[in-house]
Amino acid sequence: MLTTECAVSAKSSRRGRRSSPPHTELGLYIQKCIDRLGITRTELAQRLHISPSTVGRLLNGDTRVVQRVSAESICDALEFDEVDRRDFLKLASAASVSTFAFATGAAASKSSKSAVDLDLANDHADALSRLINQGDVRFVMESAQRWSDRLLQNPPSKDQYYAATQIRFGILLGAAQEFVFPWFQRSQAAIQTYNSIEQEVILRFGLNTFRHEYANLLSHRAPLYREIGQYEESSLQFEDGIYWVKTVDDPLLRANLFRSRIHVNAVQGNILQWSHELEEARKDALIIGSAYGDEVAGLLDYVEGEGYKRFAYNVRKDLSDRARREYAERALHSFAQSKRGTENYTKAHAMLRMVSEAQCLMWIDAREAVRRVELLRAEAELEYPALLEKINRVVFFAQQLLHSRKSNLPIHFNLDARRK
């Protein structure tokens, strides 16, 4: 990260003739980074494979700059860590899309007549994809919203590259909404975003044009219909997603659709169909091969744990506390098994798994369940706000369970019922 002391010290050791200071906020930030490294603008130009005069124009937003300089290459040339990279992208995103393209010397994409630099936009989408996995979800949502709004304004009617970029930012926006909005509000908001992308972009070209993108969109949207109780619609969307993903080469997306579909039956308490689909998903995983074997196996163990958790909370059957504890213990075992293949998976997945473990633990040791979710609360507030409702419900259920056991009264908990 940048510090005043570091910047001042480096500034005094810079070589080369003095240059006029930048006039843009982004240019000032880049200049600070140059000073921190103790290099000249000429040396930065060499790292970027451009002329020194182009660097000067880059820092000052000169419209005559025509040579492309990607955001990622700037980050690499300035040796950014993740914090620097995020700060740089925030500054870039704060400006309008056209201003950023102009400030970085990016020319309009040759494949598009649009004023938006699509290569730059996709470069930014790559960075946002990394940030959402690291937990900076609010920034991702705000940035994706800005880019989506800009890209939806007067898009070229026949430009597939432009449309693919629109889809990327739309899915990023929906995914971020799933993290940020409260649990029982996120589904409707994200579904609306995904529907907009489907209707306004994908269907303009036809599903065959964007088979991979459509399968990806369905992998996000289908589980949300399950969450709002529209199980038939959720199952249909999973079927469509599996159909389209079989026409493209994306083993992890394919595995994700097979895996996530299983949970529709778990939520409804359909144990036999759930077991059948779990076995089908494990067989399909063998097609993927060894490259993703551990990760896919870990995710299937995770969804198995989620299934057993759901059976422990089944409100459709009058199960004894002992039976519910047995399901909860099986779930905890599956969650433990899942860690082997998902150690390097997204942070959000680990947090969701820990909340699920606490939900299971409630049937075994309610006080320990509360202790664990409270340890997650501060992190969830920053990185996965949607989980706060789940955390609060664990605490509420645990209190109810402890009270019922004192009075020797049976009690059932509905994971899908909203608290008033």
Image (cartoon, rainbow, N blue to C red):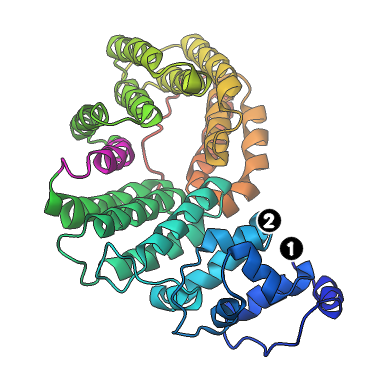
Establish if 408 lies above or below 60.
above
What span is colored magenta in the figure?
A: 207-225
Earlier in the chain: of badge 2 and badge 1, it is 1
User: x and y percent of residue 393 in the render?
Assistant: 50, 39
Q: How many marks?
A: 2
Horizontally, is 14 left or right of 159 in the view?
Answer: right
The N terminus lies in which quarter of the figure?
bottom right
Q: Secondary structure at mark 2?
A: loop
Residue marked by disc 1: 1
Indicate the amino acid at tag 2: Asp
Front residue of 366/337: it is 337
Residue 105 percent across, percent down from the top left = 48, 74
- Magenta stretch containing residue 209, yes or no? yes
Instruction: Give the vertical position of 60 relative to 223 (above or below).
Output: below
Say what amino acid the circle numbered 1 marks. Met
The residue to which callout 2 is attached is: 81
Given contact means CB atoms under 8 Å apart, are the residues at marks 2 and 1 in contact?
Answer: yes
Which residue occupies 62% across, 86% down? 22
Left/right of residue 197 with respect to residue 31 in the rendered view:
left
Q: Quadrant of residue 27?
A: bottom right
Q: Counting other residues with Cα less than 10 Å from the Cα at mark 2, is it few (<14), some (14-19), or many (20 or more)?
A: few
**Which residue appears at 49% of the width and 14% of the height?**
321
